[in-house]
C-alpha cells in the first residue's frame, strides 16, 4: 500500500523575475526585453515572450542597451557571435518600448 501524499494543484506562486544581462539587476519580466535563441540557432527579439528557446533578458533602459551593445554581452550567453546589427535592433526595440 502506498501512502504517499501528493499535493497536486496547490498554489504555485510564479514570480516572473529575471536578471538583466547588462546590469545584473533582477527585475520583473515586464520591465525587460527578452532575446531568444531558437532551436534553429536564430537569435531574435521576443516581444510577445512566446518564442521557445534559450532566453536572455535586458532592461528596457537605454543604458543597459548601450552597455550590452558595447560589450556584446549576449555573445557569451548564446555562445555565438552576434552581429552588431542585432545589438542595434535591441537598442531600437528598447528605445521604442
Ligand atoms: Zn539592466
Image (cartoon, rainbow, N blue to C red):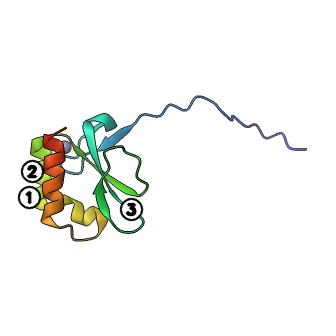
Q: Residue at x 14, y 62 (%)?
A: 85
For mark 1, give the secondary structure: helix
In the image, is residue 18 above or below residue 89?
A: above
In the picture, the disc for residue 70 is 1
Can you name the residue that lies furthest to the right here? 1
Q: Residue at x 19, y 38 (%)?
A: 97
For mark 1, does the 10 Å Cα neighbourhood hold few (<14), some (14 to 19), or many (20 or more) residues? few
Which image quarter holds the N terminus? top right
Residue corresponding to mark 3: 38
- State how far apart marks 1 and 2 are (Cα): 6 Å
Tag nearer the camera, 2 or 3 = 3
* Residue 8 seen from this side: yes
Q: In front here: 5 or 34?
A: 34
Quarter holding ligand 1: top left
Disc on the earlier residue, 3 or 1? 3
Would you identify the image quadrant in which residue 37 lies?
A: bottom left
- Residue 73: horizontal and vertical position, in percent? 19, 59
- Residue 35: horizontal and vertical position, in percent? 29, 53
In the image, is residue 4 above or below residue 86?
A: above
Would you identify the image quadrant in which residue 29 lies?
A: top left
Q: Residue at x 42, y 65 (%)?
A: 39
Disc on the earlier residue, 2 or 3? 3
Residue corresponding to mark 2: 66
In this picture, residue 34 sits left or right of residue 92 = right
- State how far apart marks 3 and 1 are (Cα): 24 Å
Q: Are marks 1 and 2 in contact (CB under 8 Å)?
A: yes
For mark 3, does the 10 Å Cα neighbourhood hold few (<14), some (14 to 19), or many (20 or more) residues? some
Q: In front here: 43 or 69?
A: 43
Amino acid at each position: 500500500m502506498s501512502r504517499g501524499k501528493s499535493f497536486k494543484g496547490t498554489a504555485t506562486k510564479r514570480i516572473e523575475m529575471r536578471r538583466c544581462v547588462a546590469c545584473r539587476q533582477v527585475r520583473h519580466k515586464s520591465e525587460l526585453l527578452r532575446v531568444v535563441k531558437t532551436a534553429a540557432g536564430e537569435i531574435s527579439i521576443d516581444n510577445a515572450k512566446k518564442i521557445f528557446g534559450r532566453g536572455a533578458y535586458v532592461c528596457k533602459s537605454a543604458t543597459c542597451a548601450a552597455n550590452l551593445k558595447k560589450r556584446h554581452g549576449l555573445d557569451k550567453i548564446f555562445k555565438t557571435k552576434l552581429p552588431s546589427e542585432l545589438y542595434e535592433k535591441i537598442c531600437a526595440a528598447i528605445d521604442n518600448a
